[in-house]
Amino acid sequence: MNTNPRTGANGTGTQPASTGAGREANSVRVVIVDDHAIFRSGLKADLHDSIQVVGEAATVEQAIAVIAEKRPDVVLLDVHLPGGLGGGGREVIAGSAALLSTTRFLALSVSDAAEDVVAVIRAGARGYVTKTISGAEITDAVHRVAGGDAVFSPRLAGFVLDAFGTAPADIADDELDKLSARELEVMRLIARGYSYKEVAKELFISIKTVETHVSAVLRKLQLSSRHELTKWAAERRLL
Amino acid sequence: MTTLPARPPLARSSDRVIAGVCSGLAAHLGWPVKNVRLGMVLASFAGGAGLVFYAWLWIMVPTADEAARRNARRPASPIAPAVSQLSRSSPAQGKTVGAPAQGTASDGGMPAGADGFSPDSTEGTAASPWFRVRGMRYGKEILLGCGLLLVAGIMIAQLLGVDVSLGTLIPAAAVLGGASIAWMQLDETRRAGLVDKTKADQAGGWGRLAAGLALVVAGVLVMVSGSGSWEQTWLALLASVAVLGGVVLVLLPWALKFWRDLEAERAGRIRETERAEIAAHLHDSVLQTLALIQRRAANEHDVVRLARAQERELRGWLFQDPGRESGQLSDRIKAAAAEVEDLLGNAVEVVTVGDAAMTEAHEALVQASREAMLNASRHGGGTVSVYLEASDGQAEVFIKDRGPGFALGDVPADRLGIRESIIGRMKRHGGSAAILSTGDGTEVRLRLPAAELAEGKP
């Protein structure tokens, strides 16, 4: 997987990567990428006023062009998209790799199946939500992603636990291929349906710490060469 | 000649040196393969009797069905085997007459359609006239007849005083042998070796082809060179090779085109089958549900429930792993969740990590989980999150809702749902249950250690 979000991310660093700093004051600029016009308009209506939709796209090519033109803070990206080479959302992220330092991708999927979503996560998306999510939840997720945090659903947490194993990392292990004891705890609670706030309360840590753990797991999910992940990716011809 | 029913039917084995005759014979007679092979070689020196016997068996005896299927490697369409069985049936009857040694046991066990034609090569014959020659109904009988006629002809010629020298016979035999080795490629390994591009099969195939070619060339060479000097022979050889090369050059594009057409046709057929299967499934499930939803459009509750149920079914069909064992703990938990979802209409999201085979104690865990899901869905009134984590050590299930919560002490003593069906049940099976309820929701935690599973505590 060479679509590491960090490599080549500084190609056109025209904007400072501090979009998250003043996000409470400014509205978040969002581009919606989905091939169903009905869904796009429904989503637009659902989003809170603090989110400003600056562009829409229906295909891979359109999406890459619109994202390059508008430079949004967050792209709401459908996993399955027509056009391009058939890579869908993954291809959009790869095509916008130069903007990854300023633009964050939040994957949208009609299904909650990890199979659909891990490809875009590994391409560089900061999280994903299902299309059945409520307007308030998606607004929250957009703000979270705009602030640089990861958005994990219970099912994605379950997939992570399945792929990385439920035993905590030994010191000898490659740190990318195992989760730490604390990360495991966080993932378990998210898989059990806890919100970040509830996780923080349960583990007696701050929400910020929870977010740090989740971001660390996201990074491992993106960069790990763990057998299960590579096998999974190879089966879907992602390597 | 033995026809004991216990014996495996006489069939050419896939464990082959040349055509699997010896190992098939050995399996049938219950002798060591080595002895049979040695005997066959020794018999070959007795005036070629072994060779003739071998060739005869090769032609008459079909390959083992499993071998054919393994070599085919692709599931054939359900119609194809029936077709090939039909076209094979009449030669098979002829075989019984011609091969008394095989007896009834072998005849009954002889898989029709096993030799030379795996079900999908039958489809290949339909595609190309060239293969159809091999599909000839009495091909084997004709081949055998020709061989016998040839032998008879030579014998008669010798009787009549014509000198058929060994110098002519040996090269002729070499040519025939080489040709048959090369033709062996058209046997059931043909498709496996050439189509599937498996390295081992292909290497063996090319090896055989090369050996056959070498034999034929050598035979022809010896035949021709008998009448001239070596110099002439070399010249002739060179010319022949040049001509052959030219012919290959001319025919190669044709062969490639033909090959590609065949591949394209196969791919198209596979696609068509898949499409038909998907269409059938969508018709049976999604279209029916959509029709139901249209009729119930007024009832939001029903629509949501139908949509959820259909989504679940479709997802199960799309993403199921065919290699996975069914009936595992995670399946049962998901089934219980689906049941609760159907019953009460609230979504029940299940996340599972790991899995375990069902035991009696696991059954109790599933029942307790179901009870907890029912409570959560009924009183929580929103989406219920279920998380199952199963490892070697234990199985844990967490059921969480976001309802108003309750205190266990407030539940009347005559309500057995929680005390009996969840806590009591888990305790009886060596597990534990904890209920954590706050104003933000309730979580039921069920735990079943594996140590208790091993004891099989009832």
Image (cartoon, rainbow, N blue to C red):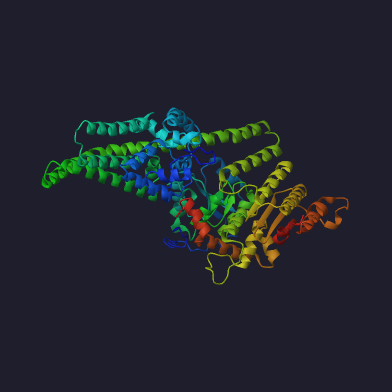
User: Would residue B54 be seen by someone viewing this image from the given angle?
Assistant: yes
- Residue A87: image location, x then y, percent: 46, 48
- Residue B210: image location, x then y, percent: 29, 47
Q: Residue at x 43, y 31 (%)?
A: B95
Q: Residue at x 23, y 38 (%)?
A: B250
- Residue B33: image location, x then y, percent: 43, 49
Between B293 and B242, the residue placed more toward the observer is B242
Between B260 and B315, the residue placed more toward the observer is B260
Q: Residue at x 47, y 60 (%)?
A: A5
Quadrant housing the C terminus of chain A = bottom left
Please state if A239 lies on the left or on the right of B319 as rendered.
left
Image quarter of residue A200: bottom right
Total tally of numbered discs in the picture: 0
- Residue B322: image location, x then y, percent: 56, 46
Image quarter of residue B400: bottom right
Q: Residue at x 53, y 57 (%)?
A: A228
Between B358 and A144, the residue placed more toward the observer is B358
User: Would residue B20 be seen by someone viewing this image from the given angle?
Assistant: no
Please state if B183 lies on the left or on the right of B334 as rendered.
left
